Amino acid sequence: AQSVTQPDIHITVSEGASLELRCNYSYGATPYLFWYVQSPGQGLQLLLKYFSGDTLVQGIKGFEAEFKRSQSSFNLRKPSVHWSDAAEYFCAVFYGGSQGNLIFGKGTKLSVKP
Amino acid sequence: DGGITQSPKYLFRKEGQNVTLSCEQNLNHDAMYWYRQDPGQGLRLIYYSQIVNDFQKGDIAEGYSVSREKKESFPLTVTSAQKNPTAFYLCASRPTGVNLETQYFGPGTRLLVL
């Protein structure tokens, strides 16, 4: 079955440190890939997406993600984390088909130490 | 301002009661979705609708019902058959077309059982 794996349930980083959140997907062809962020009690906000082309994608709030076909990965990165980045991050994949349904990973909760 | 609204923000359900969660969008999107979010579970698809007067079951449709009488509106009813309704419910919408597979989310409704 098609799936999305976020191996890290909870990550804590110090403010100003770099961040990498991992996402792996299972599929033969290249899907469309998304990262969303969710603050407590809020909806999901789109950070960035990859459909095709340049494998390094820039998003909002200083985030970027790199698609690596050989590793079936789409990891999210930020060079310097701010306290306001503390939230839950979800990777999602669109595998195609007329329904347009996304499959979500279970999320990674990010805590930021002062 | 274009966007997706969900109401109420909090909803309380008594045993045996049906409750309806509202989702409205003014983005002129054709497709709409309902997700349930539980801690550590990510997002699970309840129902989705690609066009008016048509909808499909998602992965966890039992105990829920929907309607799509207008393009802008996709209400979700949590019926008494749903034995564990306490969760955070998210509505999303998406335009249809190539490279338009991005879903946009509302702020969510938290449902609690009294």
Image (spheres, rainbow, N blue to C red):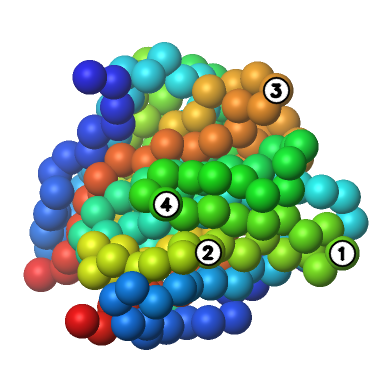
Q: Residue at x 17, y 68 (%)?
A: B113
User: Which amino acid lies under the numbered mark 3 shown in the image of this protein?
Assistant: Val
- The residue beneath circle 4 is A62
- The residue beneath circle 1 is A70
CA gap between label 2 and label 1 equals 18 Å
User: Which amino acid lies under the numbered mark 4 shown in the image of this protein?
Assistant: Gly
Q: Residue B73's quadrant in the figure?
A: top left
Q: Residue B54's quadrant in the figure?
A: top right
The answer to which of marks 2 and 1 sits earlier in the sequence is: 1
- The residue beneath circle 2 is A77
Q: Does residue B97 appear left or right of residue B64 in this picture? A: right
Q: Mark 4 lies on which chain?
A: A
- Within 10 Å of disc 3 (Cα), the crowding (few <14, some 14-19, many 20+) is few
Q: Do the residues labelled 2 and 4 touch (CB within 8 Å)?
A: no
Q: Which chain carries label 3?
A: B
Secondary structure at badge 1 equals: helix
Q: In this view, does B19 lie above or below A39?
A: above
Q: Residue at x 35, y 68 (%)?
A: A81
CA gap between label 3 and label 1 equals 25 Å
Q: Do the residues labelled 2 and 3 touch (CB within 8 Å)?
A: no
Q: Which label sits on residue B74?
A: none
The residue lying toward the viewer, choosing from B80 and B8, is B8
The answer to which of marks 4 and 1 sits earlier in the sequence is: 4
Front disc: 3 or 1: 1
User: Which amino acid lies under the numbered mark 1 shown in the image of this protein?
Assistant: Ser
Q: Are marks 3 and 1 in contact (CB under 8 Å)?
A: no
- The residue beneath circle 3 is B98
Front disc: 2 or 3: 2
